[in-house]
Amino acid sequence: MKFTGEIIAHGDCTKLIDAIKLELGNFGRSTIQVEPCEEGAKFTLCSDDATALRATLNALTQSLSIYEKMQNLQ
């Protein structure tokens, strides 16, 4: 079963994309793509199975949490 999901992160998309760019790309059974949108940045996740989706979501949310904490320090 294939899974697709979108997450929109509100804020400055340029800074956000630069901070997250290492997590983007193809990981075998899943991919993360990002594009600017009106609200900020839209992440599209595609996975071949639920386990790959969970791992991809965990990697993305971990990076987003680090980005958010760094922004709060400034």
Image (cartoon, rainbow, N blue to C red):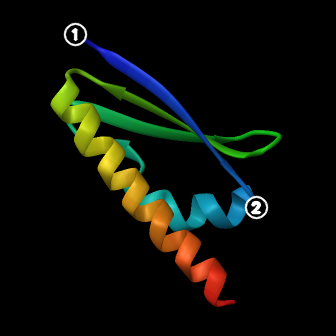
Q: In the displayed image of the protein, which residue is found farthest to the bottom?
A: 74
Q: Answer above or below: position of 26 versus 68.
A: above
Residue nearest the observer in this picture, 58 or 44 = 58
15 with respect to 58 (left or right): right
Name which quarter of the figure residue 17 lies in.
Answer: bottom right
**SS for callout 1:** loop
Query: Residue 43's spot in the image, x, y percent?
Result: 54, 39
The amino acid at mark 2 is Asp
Per the rendering, the mark at residue 12 is 2
17 with respect to 61 (left or right): right
Name which quarter of the figure residue 29 lies in.
Answer: top left
Q: Residues within 10 Å of mark 1 (few under 14, many from 20)?
A: few
On the rendered image, what quadrant is the C terminus found in? bottom right
Query: Residue 24's spot in the image, x, y percent?
Result: 42, 49
Label whose residue precedes the other's in the sequence (1 or 2) = 1
Residue located 62% across and 89% down the image: 73
On the rendered image, what quadrant is the N terminus found in? top left
Query: Residue 18's spot in the image, x, y percent?
Result: 58, 65
Image marks 1 and 2: residues in contact by CB distance under 8 Å = no
Q: Residues within 10 Å of mark 2 (few under 14, many from 20)?
A: few
Which residue was labeled with disc 1?
A: 1
Q: Answer above or below: position of 55 versus 15.
A: above
Residue located 42% across and 54% down the image: 61
The amino acid at mark 1 is Met
Residue located 57% across and 70% down the image: 68
Residue nearest the observer in this picture, 34 or 60 = 60
Q: How far separated are the C-alphas under marks 1 and 2? A: 34 Å
Name which quarter of the figure residue 25 lies in.
Answer: top left
